[in-house]
Amino acid sequence: MINGQISFWLSGPESPTPPPTDQLLSDISVDVAIVGGGVTGLWTAWALSQAEPSWRIAVFEAERLGFGASGRNGGLLSSKTVGSRKVLAKAAGGREAVMQTEKLVETAMHDVVNILGADNIHAHHGGWLQVARTPSELARLRKGLQGQRSWGIDELSLRLLAPDEVTERIRVDKPLGALYSPDNYAVDPARMVFELAKAVMALGVQVYTNARATDLEPGALLVAGRRVRARSTVIATEGYTAAQSRHRRSVLPINSSQLVTEPLTDAQWDEIGWGGYESLAGAAHTFFYSKRTHDGRIAIGGRGHPYRFGSGFDTNGIVDPETVDDLMSVLSELFPQISVTPAHAWCGVLGVARDWSPFVDYDRGTRTIRVGGYVGQGLAAALVAGRTCADLLLGRDTSYTQSPWVRPMPRRWEPEPLRWIGATGIYRAYSWADERERRSTAPKTSVLARIADKAAQR
Ligand SMILES: Cc1cc2nc3c(=O)[nH]c(=O)nc-3n(C[C@H](O)[C@H](O)[C@H](O)COP(=O)(O)OP(=O)(O)OC[C@H]3O[C@@H](n4cnc5c(N)ncnc54)[C@H](O)[C@@H]3O)c2cc1C
């Protein structure tokens, strides 16, 4: 099994070739400097250059294209809620603005596929399932569905499936029910970043790789030892923001692990179904998410060690063997009828703001935007955020700029060791809660999980 090498999507046997990028060899001046070559930075460049083709726009990526979460994620492109509705509804626009922004995310989900091309990014429109396998998980899904209805989410967008409806789609072992939504595409993350980079470069944007910004002074950046003068700056460094001085506690880099199996045989696919390429997630507190890949493997993510002391990062996605075992045991619990072999495991960081909700923080004085904080729902959100950044810099008043995402970055995370104790303690409490719930026939959520929810302030 391959471990690390950033991700299977970037270094697997059929990974796409990255488009040629620029190297920064001299000082430059641009209209907009974008720091971070993930989907947020690239969609921002795309939206800006569509609207203002005459602007000189440059994207600076410290490593290679897709080095961050954008090249390592699960490839589930959905219109699920990004952040906390309750938190975002406290903004001036209230509940209406929250739901209006969710519509923008839904539109963005389809736009991503239409703009980049379904075949180019191996997109399969299959919806998503969140399956319950214990009475407490089912009770939580029911309660969650009631909550969704109170926000106006109808039967067409989200419904509860009976056990036989679940197994008609995916033959998971002993499901008790599942939430189902048609709003999801399974995509190939590396193809998505590369196609987007190509689209952006075709619009005239300079995309620099191996171009780390070491000084983020507004208007005057230092990138790979060169001076970059910019009228406006967008900082789209998501989980890696924690490496910047003055921002070590702004965004928590939460680790998520992934694994793909060796390709399944046709007989194995016949055993488990999954002909619709739905994304499949669990309803346990220690969450998993998975999909059928374009080349006939199962990709599964979640578990693992959620946080490294001092907001640390992985080395090229190397994952610990315990996490691989954990993910494999989730697969054998879900599909005891088949035996699968792990082929490649890796991990990456996603960005979490203190109130678990996204932000597009625009300092009009310095014309600097900091953007991110989508937790694990960044693929459609990044296009919304990119369009929002563009409208803000262009001085437009639109549904994007009126979104509750446009707000100052939330308050900072706690200093160490509190941050480490909190993050690891909460995750451990969720694991214990899952174990208790698995042994119980009661539909009650474990008190441990409720305490952990309170502590996490989710
Ligand atoms: C394992 C995993 C699974 C996930 N699964 C899903 C999923 O299935 N669906 C979904 O919607 N979301 C998922 N997410 C979240 C999603 O991938 C992210 O929200 C999204 O990719 C964020 O994009 P971004 O461009 O903001 O950040 P990133 O992709 O992290 O990009 C930030 C970039 O900034 C660069 N950078 C950092 N510092 C500097 C600097 N000083 N100078 C220049 N460049 C710098 C980094 O190298 C990095 O490439 C997952 C995330 C992970 C980690």
Image (spheres, rainbow, N blue to C red):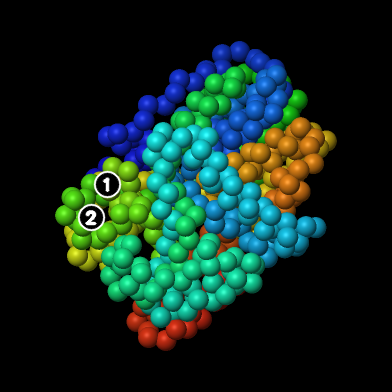
109 vs 322: above or below: above
Residue on which disc 2 sits: 269
Q: Position of residue 364 (x, y in %)?
A: 81, 37
Among numbered discs 2 and 1, the one appearing first in the sequence: 2
Mark 2, secondary structure of its residue: helix
Q: Position of residue 236 (x, y in %)?
A: 61, 38
Q: Is residue 20 visible?
A: yes
* Contact check, label 2 and label 1, Cβ < 8 Å: yes
The residue depicted at 57 percent of the width and 75 percent of the height is 146
Q: Position of residue 67 (x, y in %)?
A: 46, 36
Farthest residue in the bottom direction?
442
Q: Is mark 1 within 8 Å of ligand 1?
A: no
Crowd tier of the residue under label 2, counting other residues whose Cα lies within 10 Å: few below 14, some 14–19, many 20 or above? some
Query: Image check: 90 left or right of 211?
Result: right
The residue depicted at 39 percent of the width and 55 percent of the height is 278
The residue depicted at 56 percent of the width and 17 percent of the height is 24
The picture quadrant where one finds residue 90 is bottom right
User: Tag 1: residue type?
Assistant: Gly
Query: Image check: 351 left or right of 267?
Result: right
User: Tag 2: residue type?
Assistant: Trp
The picture quadrant where one finds residue 40 is top right
Q: Position of residue 75 (x, y in %)?
A: 43, 46
Residue on which disc 1 sits: 296
